[in-house]
Image (spheres, rainbow, N blue to C red):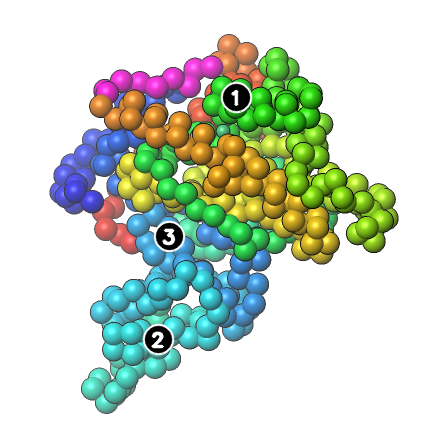
Amino acid sequence: MTVTAEELSVFAASFNPANWFDGVRAHTAVYRDERIYELEMERVFHSSWVYVGHESEIAEPGDYRLVRVGRQRMLLVRGHDGAIRLLRNRCTHRGTELCQAPSGNANAFRCHYHGWTFHNTGELVGVSFPDGYPGGTAKHGRDLWSAPRLDSYRGFVFASLRPDVPALREHLGPATDYIDGYVDHAGGRELCVDACAHTSRYRGNWKLQVENGVDGYHANFTHSSFFAVMQRRTGKQSRYIVQEEGGCTRDLGHGHVVLDQSEVAGEVLSRRLATLPGFDGLSAERLGLVEDEYRALLEANAGPGYNLSVFPNLQLIGIHIREIEPVAVDETVITLKPLMIKAAPPAINGLRRRYHELFWGPAGFGTPDDLEMLGRVHDGNRPVDGWVSFERGTHRLENGDHGPRAAITDEVPQRGLYSQWAALLSQPFTAGRK
Ligand code: FES
Ligand SMILES: [Fe+2]
């Protein structure tokens, strides 16, 4: 951070989100101003629910993985007691980063500097040469700091570094319906994170990914080469959106938004599946499945057909979990974690993996196009004091069951996420609290 705490305090004292997002436009500074980025770390990532992992990634007692919440390096751990905690990855002696391995299984974490040892519940259980502390008092109050709020919904684990936030269910609101649909898209069969997760880094602000993951306007243009290839392979129309009919965009509240193509994408996605290597040789008989089960698994491989964005850092797209990790105001890491069907035959999950890779893989048709476009948005906006537009569809907004909805190409999701951004950034600023 090159902004000093003093500069930030002065900026925060007079910060008015309405000057940067007017309801339908965002100022280009939201992508590049370090002071705004630091406020986001404090008021969004350190002050509200954020996604920290999937239960299947820490299935066994002792399983852990490193996660970053805003500026904080944390350990998501399942303790020996089976409880999940989010512990600060910082030794309470002198602050050394405790664990370096990105994931693993451990009963305890031992600091490499002076050897203090913490149980996987965060409790300090060993101080080396304890006689150096009067009466062995070094242990008192030195357990690892633990996030005060942690809860999960259908396997998705969220935490808040601040205690005074609403219950998770209340925060998620109607987004739970879409999470349910996502979790149940394989007919109730259990889903688990695949080992083939992959990470990409792009030049640009984290909100560009949030915008893009629920952008129904860009696909025909950014991904035109993909649709052309699919058309050649299948001999059929391969776009989901030919006119603007069918599907919708929705603002579900609290920054959670959805691009729902489930009505229009099913047939196209199934055709896409049929082009994959390994598909032709598959049959119910070969896999030892009854025909209905086989058909249901194939259908599940195309995913539920919508992109859900859970503000600020989780997206459910295709058959994968997408984690969004801000690194700096102009640098973002995204991690894509395909979900496999736990009890499905390997050939079905293999096809599922190929399906993910085809478009969303690091060398797939979609992800490189999108990341290139985010970099270009960054380059275009960085030197300019101006505005970007999210006005599309304001004239044809409807009130749906769960809040505003509009056509599939409309910018309801972008307005929804920036509305929550503005609400959170209106909170009082307390520099250095966490
Ligand atoms: S910093 Fe960890 S034991 Fe000293
Ligand atoms: Fe895209």
Answer left or right for 348 relative to 141. right
User: How many discs appear?
Assistant: 3
Secondary element at image label 1: helix
Secondary element at image label 3: strand
Give the foreground label among 3 and 1: 1
Q: Main secondary structure of the magenta part?
A: loop
Residue 44's x, y, as percent? 36, 41
Q: How far, Cα to Cα, is label 3 from label 1? A: 35 Å
The foreground one among 362 and 131 is: 362
Q: Mark 3 is on which residue type?
A: Arg
Identify the residue position indicated by label 1 in the image.
Answer: 224
Report which quarter residue 305 is drawn in: top right
Q: Mark 2 is on which residue type?
A: Arg
What is the quadrant of the N terminus in the image?
A: top left
Identify the residue position indicated by label 2 in the image.
Answer: 110
Q: How far, Cα to Cα, is label 1 from label 2? A: 52 Å
Residue 284 lies within the magenta run: no
Specify the segment rendered in magenta: 384-392
